[in-house]
Amino acid sequence: MKEESLKLIDKHPDSVYVLHEKVERKFSVHSHKKGQLTYVQGGITYVHMEEKTYVIPSRHYIWIPSNLKHWLQVGHSATAIRNLYFYSMDDESNPFYTRMGIYPVNTLLYEMIVFTEQWNGDIKPNDKAFAFVAAIKNILPLLGDKNLPIVLPTTTNERIRPVLLYLRDHAALPLSLQSVSEKFGFSERTLSRLFQSTLSISFLQYLKQLRMVKAVEMMLQSDMTLSQIAFATGYNSLSAFSNTFYQLTQMRPSEFEQAVIASPKPRPVK
């Protein structure tokens, strides 16, 4: 069933394929020739690539360019997502379509995406609905290009994976390159080089990004205050946490929370 559904996405190259069932999340690592828009209505969703994991908060969408291998993981079984797959023959006309990105959904785009709930499957150029779904793709570059860079590098390197798992499970601790190196029997220089060679990022930058990912998860999946989240992610003050969050996202945590809360209330996926 999963393989058949995946083949249907690319069966008609010039169509827009609409998929509202909980199917995309069941695909293993895959790619398709069409560009993909996945909108997260509630909760949090992760898109895993070969070397990165993208975090999509609720009321945001991710644009996945064509032929890019990925797989989706939802934070909770009740999380609702909507998927639209667009013909990619003209994607080179705008650099927006060639880049992976996570973007907020404004009221206009939200209403247009929700309006597609009446359809499933292929919408071909000679169908009455085609102009409408094609317009969704066409307006994306016009709605702003403020990409939300909540990305965490990943690796299959067996030397560093235990370190990454430890950091994930102990993000609230006052971690340092020295303390983590000693725990795993590395010299600081060796562990620093290992991060750079396998993840192309420094230990400190990885730790910052990990803590921001966990902070976003807490904002969306708990009733914790921002001060509680700050301490739960290893910061000794709300201001320090807020400054780091801003450095990585160009938004204050309070602005991010407000943006999510103020977004249109999700409707259930039919």
Image (cartoon, helix red, strand yellow):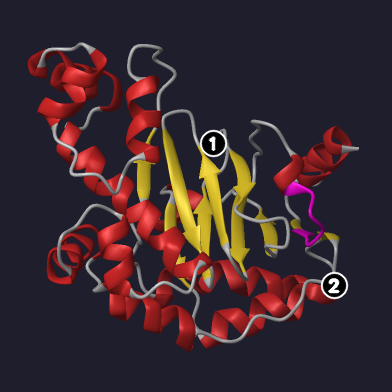
Q: Amino acid at mark 2?
A: Lys
Note whether 232 is above or below 177 in the view shown.
below
Q: Is residue 128 visible?
A: no
Give the camera-side residue of 239 and 249.
Answer: 239
Q: Amino acid at mark 1?
A: Leu
Of helix, strand and loop, which one carries label 1? Answer: loop
Of tags 2 and 1, the one toward the viewer is 2
Q: Tell me the residue at 85%/42% (across/down).
A: 5
The furthest residue to the right: 1
Q: Position of residue 187 (x, y in %)?
A: 11, 13
Q: Tell me the residue at 62%/44% (across/down).
A: 72
Give the camera-side residue of 53 and 34.
Answer: 53
- Label for residue 68? 1
Is residue 137 covered in magenta?
Answer: no
Which stretch did the figure color magenta?
18-24
**Quarter placement of the N terminus:** top right
Alpha carbon distance from label 2 to label 1: 28 Å
Q: Tell me the residue at 25%/39% (across/down).
A: 206
Q: Is 15 left, or right, of 195 in this rendering?
A: right
Q: Is 121 left, or right, of 38 in this rendering?
A: right
